[in-house]
Amino acid sequence: MTGNAALQRWVDDCARLTKPERIHWCTGTPEEYRDLIQTMVRDGTLIELNQQSHPNCYLHRSHPNDVARTENLTFICTTNKEDAGPNNNWMDPTEAKERLTKLFDGSMKGRTMYVVPYLMGPVGSQYSRVGVEITDSAYVAANMYIMTRMGEVALSQLGASEDFVPGLHSLGDLSPERRFIMHFPDERLIWSIGSGYGGNALLGKKCFALRIASSIARQEGWMAEHMLIIGLEDPSGQVTYMAAAFPSASGKTNLAMMVSSLSDQGYKVWTVGDDIAWMHVDEEGQLRAVNPEAGFFGVAPGTSYATNPIAMDTIRENTIFTNVGLTPSNEPWWEGIGSDPPEGLINWQGNVWSSEGGRAAHPNSRFTVPARQCPSISKQWEDPRGVPIAAIIWGSRRSAVVPLVMQAFDWQHGVFLGSGMGAETTAAATGAVGVVRRDPMAMLPFCGYNMADYFQHWLNIGKRLKKAPLIFRVNWFRKDKDGKFLWPGYGENIRVLKWILERIRGSGRAVETAIGFLPSQDAIDLNGLELAPEALREMLSVDKTGWINGALAMEDFYSQFGERLPREIWEEHKKLRERLQRSSASSTKA
Ligand code: OXD
Ligand code: MN
């Protein structure tokens, strides 16, 4: 029960439709979280892990068909199809409501309906927003407790206001035939049924903080982005903040928690967020970012003391693991954890694992953990004003063509670079892995409206900035002809961040090329790193044929948006082609 009439009305309506056995209003206390966990341990939804080595840690095994985001079942239901754009699946809102009303009808019979009020953003921040999720999954409610500021804190921010984003979620029967993740941006409403997977079911994350928030942000003049936020501390102790967009499962959590290999020189990375940034232009024309989340929902495989020691220390307690393997001593295990699979290992589906039997952990297995217990969490991570952003970084997996790092000529060129970004697909969404697709600003699955308008929004924001952040493109994933990574990545990425910092300060050495400013061969600090000079040369050269082909792929992508695509994007595309032609002509002559 709540004193907020609009909220009470909506909860009553949902209960009438879904017919739960009981209703539980989440208050967000640690006792309530413990009760949720105990209920799930009793009914088998969770397995208690070794409480000596992993206090308060649990394992959840999901339905095997429900392990990743399902982009083909995710819809933006605007009145006009064009407002959703070619980047989204679209369904008429009336039809979507009719279809889902049938599925929600009685879907919570015999179940508890949890009402989860939550706050996205720091307490007391003018940038924070309230959402309320109704769900019949205790696993979802417990994950929301970790990932958001849940319960009373949200209700007290809401007061009597009607300004909250309602999200109705039910596991339904978990059948992909009856699975839909529906967004109604015009009403700021979410309906999701048939999946318990994070990105489909924790409605504060992708559904609200990205798809619905991106649409609100466009109307209100701010930005909701698929970006990590870090603070880079230099030897004098000064911290410079950067926001970086990478597609799902492409190393955002690793970058956000990086242990710098230049720590002896005094360079250190502080974590503000690992997945989502809400960014506003302040009264002084400065871009400021808050992390709307309170936890990390990170990919487990590949996480180890060698690749991400901070994450490993973060997930030692109070963590829910989903779809990882289980050792005979009840500890979590996954491929790339840094130890051999032990005898008697159980795989993510609960069967004894054998080396012929595939992976022990699902490639998209996850950990959910409170951000506050991360050893590298920034002192500013809950600053209600957000942190000032000095650089924006685009990154994705590209085994060829894209250099280790490059800088855009200016804001408009940087927006163009982000808009045409190609990325190899990963296991975070169902479908083929490793296929290059255009994933503008790493927002293709998350932009809640027509991306042509999104690019225009980025261009408009640039006009309001007094000192626009510099924009960069990075690629840690270049491979040589034998398929080996050319760059060591992880903690060595600090060397690239150091060059970015130098560029912000006007000191980093660079050469102007057809595609942007590239570091000159001696500009990246390689002290203490063994790297073949040819490898660096390859990663810092312009692959003209690759870029010409890339420009062609961009043309196909942009053409889908017709007249709606901002002319500035075509202008930058033309300029890129001309620069590439000029440089091919001069290199042919030479
Ligand atoms: C995520 C994703 O879970 O991008 O963050 O899929
Ligand atoms: Mn993400």
Image (cartoon, rainbow, N blue to C red):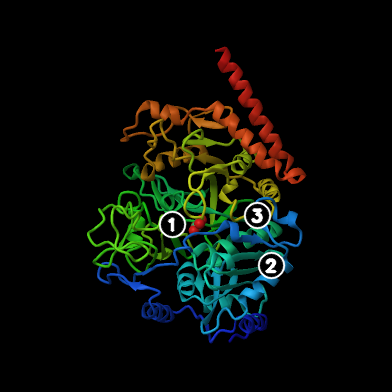
Q: Amino acid at mark 2?
A: Ala
Residue 538: x %, y % from top left:
44, 28
568 left or right, relative to 373? right
Q: Label 2, secondary structure: give it.
A: helix
At horizontal 42% and vertical 35% (from top left) the residue drawn is 479
In the rendered image, residue 248, in percent from the top left (x then y), is placed at: 50, 52
Label 1 sits on residue: 364
- Judging depth in this view, the residue of 86 and 358 nearest the camera is 358
On the question of residue 465 being in view, the answer is yes
Q: Is mark 2 within 8 Å of ligand 1?
A: no
Q: Of the residues under marks 3 and 1, which one precedes in the sequence?
A: 3
Tell which of 137 and 505 is nearer to you.
137
Left or right of 82 on screen, residue 494: left
The disc labelled 1 sits on which kind of residue? Asn
For the residues labelled 3 and 1, the Cα–Cα distance comes to 23 Å
Using a 10 Å C-alpha cutoff, classify the residue at mark 2 as few (fewer than 14 neighbours), some (14 to 19) or many (20 or more): some
Q: Give the percent coordinates (x, y) of residue 468.
A: 61, 45
Counting residues from the start of the chain, the first of labels 3 and 2 encountered is 3
Q: CA distance from mark 3 to mark 2?
A: 15 Å
In what element is the residue under mark 1? loop
Q: Which residue is mark 3?
A: 88
Are the two marked residues, 2 and 1, in contact with CB atoms closer than 8 angstroms? no
Binning the other alpha carbons within 10 Å of mark 3 as few (below 14), some (14 to 19) or many (20 upward) gives many
Q: Is residue 378 visible?
A: no
Residue farthest toward the left in the current orientation of the protein: 343
Q: Whole-percent x and y of residue 58? A: 35, 70
Q: Give the label, 3 or 2, closer to the camera.
A: 2
| Residue type, numbered disc 3 | Asn
Q: Which residue is mark 2?
A: 96
